[in-house]
Image: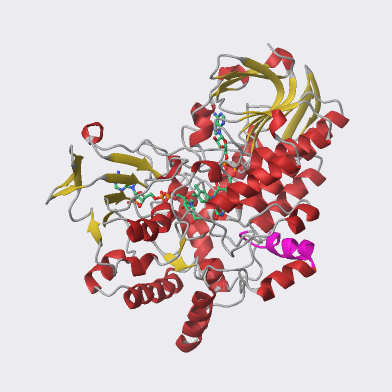
Amino acid sequence: MAERLDVLIVGAGFSGMYMLMKCREQGLKVQVIEAGSGVGGTWYWNRYPGARVDIQSLEYSFGFDEALERDWRWTERYAPQPELLAYANHVATRFDLSRDISFNTRVTAAHWDAAADGWTVTLDNGETRAARFVVMATGCLSVPTDVTFPGIDDYQGDVYRTSRWPHDGVDFTGKRVGIIGTGSSAIQSIPIIAAQAAQLTVFQRTPNYSMPAHNGPIPDADFQEWLADPRAYRARSRATVGGFWNEAREDAILIHTPPDEIKAELERRWAWGGFRILGAFADQALDPEANRVVHDFVAAKIRERVKDPRVAELLTPKDHPFATKRPCVDTGYYDTYNRDNVELLDLRADPLVSFTATGIQTQAASHDFDAVVLATGFDAMTGAIERIDIRGVGGETIKDHWAAGPETYLGLMVAGFPNLFLITGPGSPSVLTNMIHSIEQHVEYVADIIAALNASQAGRIEASPEAEKLWTDHCDQTAAMTLLPQANSWYMGANVPGKPRRFMAYAGGLHHYTDTCNAVKAKGWEGFVIARGDQLLSESREFTSYPPPPETMAPHLVEMAMGRVAKWLEAHGQPA
Ligand code: FAD
Ligand code: N01
């Protein structure tokens, strides 16, 4: 076996790349293992037409190095995938990262070796590596779901998955194309494919809410504001719920606002575009009545854009409140349905039966295609971690530990799995935020933990089961306060048959979460057990660093949120 590493990092997306840099700063012996042939993770794999960010690029980019920020110029408000991949490659070259990355290599197993206070990691090329720490930078949305369809192997046309798109691109000119799915990936690719193909048929099971990006060059005023003080710009984003600036009005209550003012505010935000609408009113994510008003506003926008009222109706979400799935940000999505070469099929009314040699058979008709695109989503948050055979203390697997849904301490560590860190793991704000800011916060925190352990010559750190339980309950209850668990979303694990239902991200906001992590550290790593061999160095089994109660929240919202928590406690067999 090769020389023991201090840190083995799995994944070379933005998380793994930054983790590598932070480890090097401490002079650690570190190696990254990456399944793909290059860096960039999400932006390496998802090369489908129209792929781009839903957070503005001035915010969705690394903020740890002002020289890097100033040297890179984004061309659009929402950068497209090729530019994001070029950015990842630029970072890798600038910081000479690739010499410590093994590409085209997959981690298949990681077993805790108690005698060595470290991990034995197995790779798909048959090699093993010993490492004191393992960092799972494996991505929240990196493993496509195993969705398949009867007869798909008999289909003689081409099948493409958005998340595994050919590197040379695909030319649909003159082709009849079908696309399954209407999540973010489909909503971004549909307008581009429709403009190229002879005919596009969209198979929709559930409509989603989508807001216009109004993409284009970065408005000069925004760029000048950023240029004046990038540090202040970043600090402003990081101090928000979602890690991006959306002018959130924490004291604006929709149901206390006159209708004309509501409309004016929503119109202003719709015209601005993207996620700005999420910050309009404090009650829209909590109160069904307020949420309904925003839903009605978006439904009217869909009717305005889509000429055929039947199609507009089909495109209007009905089964989940607004923004309880990650909302989509589009360029020309609804207008695409006004094209003569685009057809929307409703799989609820006419279910998909099977693929055939020439296309897709639904209950009512058969549809012939030259190519079919699967935009069917990801086994989110836990998928990449559970696909590795991770065995902790006593040989327990992480999959077994998470049999009832993922349980972590701060989304960072799992009890019984010492020295194993998760970047943006379940139980952290992760996918509810601008992920780059969540990644930076996690990577810097993990680097701090490793530095503290080394300074005290400790061998290992582990989340205590007690703290893990307290944090997981806190996550569940925080989600229960909101409308978020009401959607059958991938946040809930609802898109993967048999996956346990649990709201997997921390809904308390990136700002409160960061403060909580800092308080845990200030209390000498509250909730963690630190040891060297048989020697216990420090032990905390508590978690007392809860975020502050939302004092600015209107009384009726507190009542509503607390009512939902009481119900949650009742359902989980605990006294309210
Ligand atoms: P990833 O980028 O997913 O990288 C993980 C890497 O780990 C991958 O390269 C994978 O190959 C590797 N890996 C996994 N398992 C193994 C293994 N066993 N062995 C070896 N290697 C392994 N977030 C936002 O905040 N804003 C956005 O606009 C946005 N847009 C998105 C668009 C798409 C199409 C998708 C899918 C996600 C988007 N996200 C967005 C979320 C996005 O995943 C994060 O922003 C971010 O890129 C995640 O970086 P990461 O390094 O943590 O994970
Ligand atoms: O995946 P999804 P995605 N038969 O799960 C349908 C990020 N992202 O790749 O809802 C028929 O959202 C499924 O239908 P239903 C972002 O966080 C960001 O689009 O299960 N249909 C749904 O319509 C996003 O949320 C961007 O009824 C089937 C679709 O497939 C996340 O990644 C861009 C089916 C899957 O939608 C995931 O987005 C892309 C079946 N058997 C991704 N199985 C940005 O804009 C599934 N579906 C930045």
Residue 270 in the figure: left or right of residue 69: left
Q: Is residue 241 magenta?
A: yes
Which corner quadrant of the image does residue 16 belong to?
top right
Q: How is the image coloured?
A: secondary structure
Q: Residue furthest right?
A: 455
Residue 206 in the figure: left or right of residue 250: left
**Residue segment shown in magenta:** 229-242
Residue 207 in sight from this viewpoint: no
Can you say whether 523 is above or below 274 in the image?
above
Residue 556 in the figure: left or right of residue 22: left
Residue 181 percent across, percent down from the top left: 34, 51
Can you say whether 482 is above or below 7 in the image?
below
Residue 228 in the figure: left or right of residue 390: right
**In the foreground, 14 or 369:** 369
Write the residue at 39% across / 46% down.
170
Write the residue at 75% across / 61% down.
235
Which corner quadrant of the image does residue 552 belong to?
bottom right
**In the foreground, 511 or 565:** 511
Q: Quadrant of ligand 1?
A: top right
Write the residue at 55% across / 50% down.
82
Can you say whether 285 is above or below 120 in the image?
below
Counting labels gives 0
Residue 257 percent across, percent down from the top left: 51, 84
User: Where the N terminus falls, by quadrant?
Assistant: top right
Magenta: main secondary structure: helix
Residue 26 percent across, percent down from the top left: 83, 34
**In the foreground, 377 or 359:** 359
Residue 337 percent across, percent down from the top left: 30, 66
Residue 571 in sight from this viewpoint: yes
**In the foreground, 459 or 568:** 459
Q: Is residue 46 magenta?
A: no
